Image (cartoon, grey):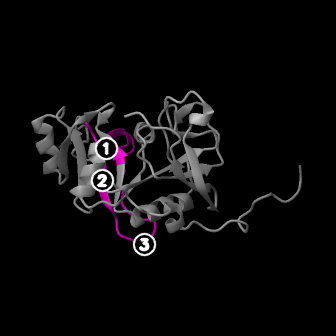
Amino acid sequence: MNGDPVVDGADLPPPDAARLLGDVDPPADRPYVVLKYAQTLDGRIATAGGDSKWISGEEERAVSHALRAACDAVMVGVGTVLRDDPRLTVRLVPGASPLRVVLDSTLRTPSHALLLDSDPGTVVLTTDRAGDGDRERVRGSGAQVRVLPSGPGGVDLPAGLRVLRRECGVRSLLVEGGARVITSLLGAGLVDRIVVGTAPTIIGAGTEAVGDLGIVRVAEGIALRNRYVCLTADDIVTAWDVCYARPRRA
């Protein structure tokens, strides 16, 4: 059908990092946790072969950098480190880079990983499944290594968040993936805000942003409230507060 679109760039505000983050009010025992990822219109964060560069446009990626600059720390899982070798620094916008955090229960992070450079600092959260040699290797690459209890999928997430809050002074934590980390945090009820950049692309089979949460009824799903929507040149960015309708599994 011909005619003007229902929504165009004049109808929605430009991205505002403060509004995307929402009301940063961390609990006493952990940081305020914000999930941020880019996905295709059909909910994929990578192709079946693992390619994700680039799902979103440059302006949407600049939003991610602005969120990094607004948070105390940015965290990914080791799968993202091995697949993408991210720097996790602020480059596309003005601002200081936050502390970088990696969840890596067996210390598979390679010594040459870009996020192990000296500035800003990096903390690797691991478990006693990591050998002494790998602990010294990662420390020798410039990172702090914190050994924590094991959880259902690797590092015990509540313990890791407590360490970041109490020992590292992290009040706001931006989590950029991957899917396993996103799913684990949502499943454990540890997410306060979610920010999603949706690209006008469909790829079919691929990596889902969120995996199985054990939800069998729609009414038991995780509710999202206080919507904020903005446009970039190519993508739609949406943000919500996360509201849990039932106690989450450990």
User: Would you place residue 192 above or below residue 219 in this image?
Assistant: below
Q: Earlier in the sequence, mark 3 or mark 1?
A: 3
Looking at the rendered image, the disc whose residue lies closer to the viewer, 3 or 2, is 2
Type of the residue with mark 1: Pro
For the point 61% across and 35% down, the residue is 219
Give, as a three-letter code, the residue at label 2.
Asp
Numbered disc in front, either 3 or 1: 1
Residue 114 at least partly seen? no
Near mark 1 (Cα within 10 A), the count class, few <14, some 14-19 or many ≥20, is: some
Dot 2 falls on a residue whose secondary structure is loop
Q: Is residue 215 above or below residue 97?
A: above
**Residue at (39%, 71%) from the top-left corner?**
95
Say which residue label 2 marks: 29
Q: Give how far across and how far down residue 134 sits, in percent.
A: 15, 39
Q: Secondary structure at mark 3?
A: loop
Residue 185 rendering spot, x and y as whole percentages: 41, 42
Numbered tag placed on residue 94 in the rendering: 3
List the residue tagged with mark 1.
Answer: 158
Nearer to the camera, 33 or 232: 33
Q: Which residues are magenta?
A: 76-105
**Quadrant housing residue 57:** bottom right
Relative to 218, does residue 189 appear above or below in the rendering? below
Q: Is residue 154 left or right of residue 55?
A: left
Q: In the image as oriented, which residue stretches furthest toward the bottom?
A: 94
Counting from the top left corner in percent of width and height, residue 187 is at 44, 37
State the separation of the CA atoms marked 1 and 2. Answer: 9 Å
Give coordinates of residue 158: x percent, y percent.
31, 44
Q: Is residue 22 above or below residue 164?
A: below
Mark 1 or 2: the one toward you: 2
Q: Nearer the viewer, residue 190 or 106?
A: 190
